[in-house]
Amino acid sequence: MDHWIIEAMVFLGSFLMVYNIWGFVRYTRYVKQKADFGKNSNVLYVPVLFLVMFLLGYLVVGFFGKPDLVMAGILLGGSVFVFIMYRALKQITRIIVDNEEKMSELLAAEKSRKEKSSFLSSISHEMRTPMNAILGLTRMALSHDDLPEKTREELEMIGQSGKHLLGLIDNTLDMQYLESGDYQVRSEYFCLKDMTDQIRAITLQRCKEKGLEFRLEMDRGTEGHYMGDVMLIKQVLLAILDNAIMYTEEGSVKLTVRREKTEGDTCRLRFIVEDTGIGISPEFLPKVFDLFAREDASSKSRYGGSGIGLAVARNKARLMGGDIVASSEKGRGSVFEVTLPLPVCQEEAVPETEEKQESTENTEEPVSLEGLRILVVDDVEMNTEITSDLLELEGMESECAQNGQIALDMFRASPEFYYDAILMDLRMPVMDGLEATRAIRGLERKDAGQVPIIALTANAFESDREKSLEAGMNAHLGKPTDPESLYETLRQQIQLCRKERVVAQ
């Protein structure tokens, strides 16, 4: 009986070793496919060579020797050991390769994301630069009082079409930017009343152009300070309000602000936009936030719009942890409700700098722009001409530099506090706006750290704004720039600068 057991063990060990050799040959080919060993590839065949030698030894012992039970057990055990090690090694190698492939995919995805972000920033700059010229020159032409009525109407149509195209560009780029995952929601203190006042001023003007009534109602208890991305909130609300104005021929648009208490210091703010427009059919209502969604062709030809704005607005709201819902009845208007969870800021927790700024705005007379000297830095001559003309309309003087190096040299050569502010483009040859700002801030003179430097650029993404502020700029304005926003920003920053000078003295 022992004789048959011994032969079976030897046979099994030999067969298993043959399988091990075949498995190692396949494993060697797999490893060579995954890595380039070059001249060292022969090392992969060393295990196979040793296994062949072991197999020959098994065969010699099995067929020409007289192995006992112990020797047969050792032979079989060796084959089993090699089999287990081969399977384990194969599994470990596969895990390592899989991890490397996943890491390569992640690196490739990260590289693609950065390239996409860079492309979006570049294409935004290239699109906004000519739009700045179109809208800026149109605005300057309309400022002349002696224009023929027909010419004025045509210029106004050009301006409206330019604004429509700019909105389409903004929505398209915003959609791509949000999908790239680069947008980081900021958390900063802001006053809700100040924000709604700004929204009311913008929306009121747009409603007047269409002969609509606009109302803003804030429930008691909503006023105060909150923490959130105020720029993103304004973009969402203005997109909803613009949509309401677009589809309302007569009547009114209303914005209501309500507050609901939730757990802890966070509350739920509800911004309700109601209009008396054409309304939305029950069949289309579930699709109203879909990308490029349009109810019918007649709406497109009559009311315009791209079908992007509402989709982008909802994505932005959800990015902040909120949402937008809609209800409507055909022919009776629509209601869009934006819900956002925002931490409430207790009055004593408001940063001192913000309190100081609000106090300054409330107690001091607004800065007069008359006679101020502004350094305009931009490599596109048409842009400097447009900006200089806008400054001249408010009685300001301007000097121009074609790149950051020239601006730095002009600032260094000027007397202290010669320039009241600097309007700085970002993308320029020789020295860009960020580098120029850092260089100016690093100069050893009193006005180097105090002169307001405002980014005036076609780079309008949030990441561009963050880079501007990190470089030492005081504010960031995107092109094309609304003149009133430019003037107001100059007033605020120059007022703060003068306040700091008084404190320093």
Image (cartoon, rainbow, N blue to C red):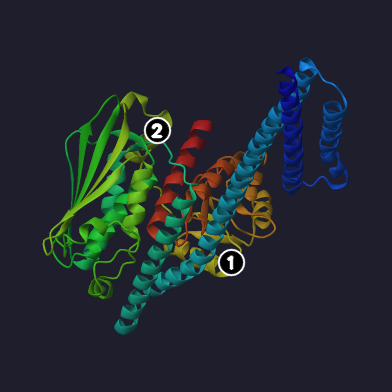
In terms of depth relative to the viewer, which is nearer, 162 or 51? 51
In terms of depth relative to the viewer, which is nearer, 345 or 388? 345
Expressed as whole percent of the image width and height from the top left, the position of residue 222 reads: 22, 36
Residue for badge 2: 356
In terms of depth relative to the viewer, which is nearer, 338 or 358? 338
Q: Earlier in the sequence, mark 2 or mark 1?
A: 2
The residue positioned 60% from the left and 47% from the top of the image is: 105
At numbered mark 1, what does the secondary structure look like: helix, strand or loop? loop
Residue 416 position (above or below residue 310): above
Q: Is residue 469 visible?
A: yes
- Residue 380: assigned label: 1
Q: Quadrant of residue 380?
A: bottom right
Residue 277 position (above or below residue 80): below
Q: Is residue 354 left or right of residue 271?
A: right
At label 1, the amino acid type is Val
Expressed as whole percent of the image width and height from the top left, the position of residue 214 reads: 18, 56
- Count up the numbered dots: 2
- Residue 268: assigned label: none
Q: Is residue 164 left or right of residue 90?
A: left
At label 2, the amino acid type is Lys
In terms of depth relative to the viewer, which is nearer, 56 or 201? 56
Expressed as whole percent of the image width and height from the top left, the position of residue 443 reads: 67, 42
At numbered mark 2, what does the secondary structure look like: helix, strand or loop? helix
Q: Residue furthest left?
A: 332
Q: Is residue 505 visible?
A: no
Q: Is residue 11 left or right of residue 154?
A: right
Q: Residues within 10 Å of mark 2 (few under 14, many from 20)?
A: few
Expressed as whole percent of the image width and height from the top left, the position of residue 354 reads: 40, 34
The residue positioned 51% from the left and 37% from the top of the image is: 501
